[in-house]
Amino acid sequence: MTRPAIILPILAVIGFGLLSAVFIVDEREKALVLQFGEVRSVKEDPGLSFRIPIIQEIVRYDDRILPLDTQPLEVTPLDDRRLVVDAFARWRIKDSVQFRRAVGTSGVAGAAPRLERILNAQLRQVLGGVTSGSVLSADRAVLMNLIRDSARTEAEALGVEIVDVRIKRADLPEQNLAATFERMRAERQREAADEIARGKEAAQKVRAQADRTVVELTSEAGKQAEIVRGEADAMRNAIYADAFGRDPEFFAFYRSLRAYENSLKGENSTLVISPDSEFFDYLKSDTVVQADSGGQ
């Protein structure tokens, strides 16, 4: 066998060995160098790295933040009002060596159910210590941070870090929705009835006050009118009295003319009076002549 025929296979084996010894660490991942199942080194910086071919193997883990969506979980708050809670978490591998020891060869797929159990336990513990009103109000943000901190402590044993925990929804179970809606409707109807009753009571008070004000104003106006009318009558009587005192004959004549005018109105006026009655004194010719003579 010639020398080139021997050297070429050897070079090929050496080249294959060198290529097998080189591996690339991506910036989005961490790499563990294992030798017979034991961790020999951790490669976290991106770039080229080396290993011993065949003897050492490379295990890669994602170094990015990973999602974890849990199954809907039923919890019972302090007021015994059951809620179906749907939550999710964001986590990342913090210690790849500890993570390898905790989950073994199952990797991320094996860590997800264990993290879900931790998260569900903290959801039950934290939400079970408050009322359903707190879960459904703005206090939910504080509760989510408390769940995150508690779950983060337990997740350290897996070599992972819980970055965030969020509650997507917290609803009543389907079988309780109809009863709850009915109770809410009854409460709103009762509140509406109370408001209507209070409105009617207030309207009655306003109406009574208005009626009282009308009576008082009318009474006061009538009083003032009577006073003005009395003052006017007194002034009129004073004028009449003054005129009567100045010329009694003219005053008697004027009153007789007014009496004639008032008594002889209309087409069907009928008077039954003796012709020599004093009522006709100023209608008699001699009286008129005397009055005219006196005037001259």
Image (cartoon, helix red, strand yellow):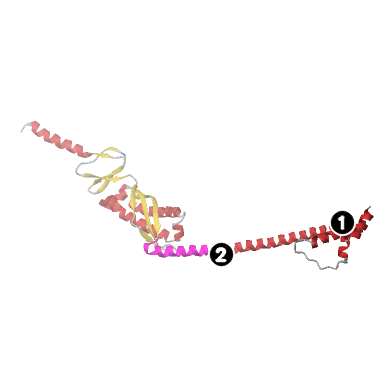
Circle nearer the N terminus (1, 2): 2
Amino acid at pointer 2: Ala
In this rendering, is residue 251 above or below 49? below
Q: Which x, y percent locates residue 40?
A: 27, 45
Determine crowd level at label 1: few under 14, some 14-19, many 20+ residues with C-alpha closer than 10 A: few
Q: Which x, y percent locates residue 11?
A: 14, 34
Q: Nearer the viewer, residue 93 or 34?
A: 93
In this rendering, is residue 100 above or below 245? above
Is 71 colored magenta in this rendering? no
Q: Nearer the viewer, residue 32 or 39?
A: 32
Q: Is residue 80 left or right of residue 279?
A: left
Q: Is residue 166 left or right of residue 243?
A: left
Q: Which residues are magenta?
A: 172-200
The residue labelled by disc 1 is 239
SS for dot 1: helix
View extreme (front): residue: 285
Q: Quadrant of residue 196?
A: bottom right
SS for dot 2: helix
Residue at image position (22%, 39%) is 21
Q: Nearer the viewer, residue 125 or 288?
A: 288
